[in-house]
Image (cartoon, rainbow, N blue to C red):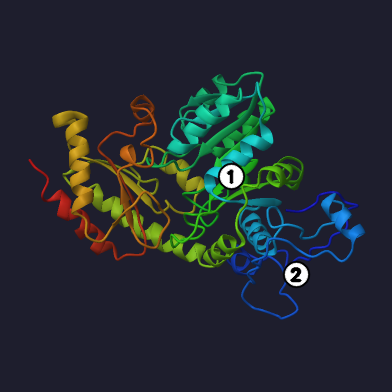
Amino acid sequence: MTDSRSDAPRGIPRVQLPGDARLDTLAVREGLPPSAWGENSEALFLTSSFVQPDAATAARRFANEEDAFIYSRFTNPTVTMFERRLAALEGAEACVGTASGMSAILLLGMGLLKTGDHVICSRSVFGSTIRLFAGEFGKFGVETTFVSQTDPDEWRRALKPNTKLLFAESPTNPLTEVCDIRALSAIAKDAGAWLAVDNCFCSPALQRPMAYGADLVIHSGTKYLDGQGRVIAGALCASEQLVNDKFTPVMRSAGMSLSAFNAWVVLKGLETLSIRMEAQSARALQLGAWLETQEQVERVFYPGLKSHPQHALAMAQQSAGGAVVSFIVRGQAEGGPALARSNAFHVIDSTQICSITANLGDTKTTITHPSSTSHGRMTEEQREAAGITQGVIRVAMGLDHIEDIKADLLRGFSTLSQ
């Protein structure tokens, strides 16, 4: 986290990189210069506090008059390295690392919103995000209107004089709906509001929302940024002014902090981000195309397929379709939600390779039933509004061989009751 005041002393040095360094280079180089020991791999600073040279310097630093490391709740070299690297990848001025993706959204709300404010949010976002806006923020007098992910006119009609924030995921979890970031940015700017985009599914390797007008970008670093299912982490990317004036003061007081160890793990994950996303997206595209040929599958959701309703928009905003493929298994039409759920469970339980877990972004392919896991705390009405029926299965493609994953799913498809 940096101090944007031009007269503030700059006590934390930066890595000296060419101004035109590309994303892949930034992913392995941006951060802090090596210490006096000249380490090539980023150092892990496991310390709660930092010794100050004298009382007067300590006073200046605690007053935010001098840029330095003070206390690991809000300043730590390893966390700073992660923040600088992710900010560079997203094309943002600054970043705040947080304890989880949900804590990044909590920090967003605590930093920008107050009683009487209004939020417009896609009704297709992650279930916990819906609960946070509708429930926890609602307790403190923040009103949220949920709208169609894909209809900018509905977002515009939902505007109120007190609208302060528009919030979207793109693509969404689990149905991979894509929003028009440029259109939402224009709506937000006309209303004097901020646009925040959760970029978890794509990561900056495939999409950079700020290039299309987003003001803030949210990440669950637990997913693709880490990439191997090891730690919980989150981040909020924004301008230096927002980070310094709105979010750092909340972080200092509330402490939804990213640990140095978790930051270090995600830093190492960022080094292989673009390679992993390219490989996993290619496998996901093959899986989606194959699923469309299976008679036991009613519908496939994947932005990289031409059958996806927002395929053209997705390919304009993203460099690939991403690694998540969702589909509806047969059963809803024949026997309603109960049969659809039973069939979905059967397909999931028949797998021998896929990991049955609601996490995603791992190098291991994961499979889950969103209605009963990631979106299980939503009401049935909320799930139906978002299109998350009992027959939906989400597969987050890892680096397993694609033919093994096809065979894994066929175990269930071939034994579904007729």
Q: Name above or below for residue 383 compared with residue 357.
A: above
Which residue is at 80% across, 60% downward? 68
Q: Which residue is under mark 1?
A: 104
Q: 203 or 99, which is in the foreground?
A: 99
Q: Is residue 352 visible?
A: yes
Q: Is residue 103 left or right of residue 4?
A: left
Q: Amino acid at mark 1?
A: Ala
Q: Which mark is residue 331?
A: none
Q: 117 or 201, which is in the foreground?
A: 117
Query: Helix or strand or loop: what does disc 2 sit on?
Result: loop
Query: Helix or strand or loop: what does disc 1 sit on?
Result: helix
Which residue is at 63% across, 39% downward? 108
Distance between the Cα atoms at labels 1 and 2? 29 Å
- Quadrant occupied by the C terminus: top left
Which residue is at 17% across, 44% downward? 296
Q: Residue furthest left?
A: 418
Measured as percent of width and height from the top left, residue 292 is found at 24, 47
Q: Is residue 225 left or right of residue 107?
A: left
Query: Toward which corner of the image does residue 392 lie, by quadrant?
Result: top left
Measured as percent of width and height from the top left, residue 411 is found at 15, 55
Q: Name above or below for residue 73 compared with residue 265.
A: above
Q: Is residue 92 visible?
A: no
Depth check, mark 1 against mark 2: the one in front is 1
Q: Name above or below for residue 19 compared with residue 237.
A: below
Query: Toward which corner of the image does residue 354 lie, by quadrant?
Result: bottom left
Mark 1 or 2 closer to N-term?
A: 2
Q: Which residue is under mark 2?
A: 16
Q: 262 or 166, which is in the foreground?
A: 262
Measured as percent of width and height from the top left, residue 175 is found at 37, 40
